[in-house]
């Protein structure tokens, strides 16, 4: 799980590098006196930035698959500790991510319930809150920036769209780091509670 998140961070860092390089080429390429060299540099920068985005998308799919397997197991383990601590059946640990609009909050509520069921003394889910806020904000900014970048034709619009995408990448890195902390902390809490569980745990 953490390895997949680390690769996601690496892809985000590459995207930031490519985005900064692309943004630096906008001015020269769109000036009234743009040279052929400037246009070629802009086209090359766009190509690299596009490939960075493709790498991000590929790793998003891989990381999402790995995370959903882990999240489902954590949900089933949480039920061992608190049978009445959940408002939805275990299958929703995966299904909730695919509900339009509902996926903005349903997985978060399940994560909070798993956290509370697994934590000693039902500690506050501050880490869950921070991770979810960073991830949702990054996702929304990435969508908005991508839409804006695809429609942009003027230099200012392109630079603004790339700036939004760069911010989304920074927040995605923060979300990935927080997700690592969430996985590590929750797995540790469930392992610590395993000796007191009333049933077998699923290995995380």
Image: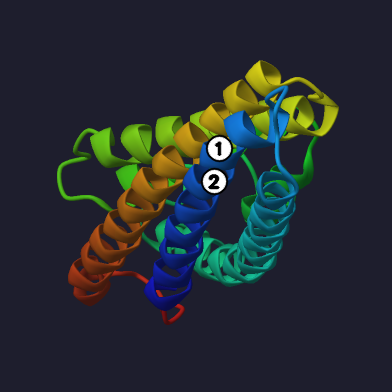
Residue lying at 69% horizontally and 63% vertically, measured from the top left: 51
**Residues tagged 1 and 2 counted as in contact (Cβ below 8 A):** yes
Query: The N terminus lies in which quarter of the figure?
Result: bottom left
Count how many numbered circles sit on residues in the image: 2
Q: Quadrant of residue 28?
A: top right
Which mark identifies residue 149? none
Residue 195 drawn above or below residue 87: below
Which mark identifies residue 19? 2
Q: Quadrant of residue 101?
A: top right
> Does the image show residue 76?
yes
* Place of residue 68 in the rendered image (x, y in percent of width and height, measured from the top left): 60, 63
Query: The C terminus lies in which quarter of the figure?
Result: bottom left
Residue lying at 68% horizontally and 27% vertically, measured from the top left: 158
Q: Mark 2 falls on what kind of element?
A: helix
Q: Residues within 10 Å of mark 1 (few under 14, many from 20)?
A: many
Residue toward you, 74 or 121: 74
Residue under label 1, please give it.
23
Q: Residues within 10 Å of mark 2 (few under 14, many from 20)?
A: many
């Amino acid at each position: 799980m953490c390895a997949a998140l680390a690769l996601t961070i690496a892809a985000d860092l590459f995207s930031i590098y490519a985005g900064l390089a692309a943004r630096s080429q906008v001015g020269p390429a769109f000036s009234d006196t743009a040279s052929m060299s400037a246009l070629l540099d802009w086209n090359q920068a766009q190509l690299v930035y596009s490939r960075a985005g493709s790498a991000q998308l590929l790793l998003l799919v891989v990381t999402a698959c790995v995370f959903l397997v882990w999240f489902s197991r954590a949900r089933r383990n949480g039920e061992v500790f608190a049978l009445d601590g959940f408002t939805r059946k275990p299958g929703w640990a995966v299904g909730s991510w695919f509900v339009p609009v509902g996926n903005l909050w349903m997985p978060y509520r399940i994560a909070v319930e798993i956290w509370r069921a697994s934590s000693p003394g039902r500690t506050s889910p501050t880490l869950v809150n921070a991770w979810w806020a960073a991830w949702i904000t990054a996702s929304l900014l990435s969508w908005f920036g991508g839409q804006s970048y695809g429609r942009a034709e003027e230099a200012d619009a392109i630079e603004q769209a790339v700036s939004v995408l760069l911010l989304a990448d920074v927040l995605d890195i923060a979300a990935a780091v927080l997700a690592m902390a969430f996985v590590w902390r929750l797995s540790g809490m469930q392992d610590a509670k395993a000796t007191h569980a009333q049933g077998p745990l699923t290995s995380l």
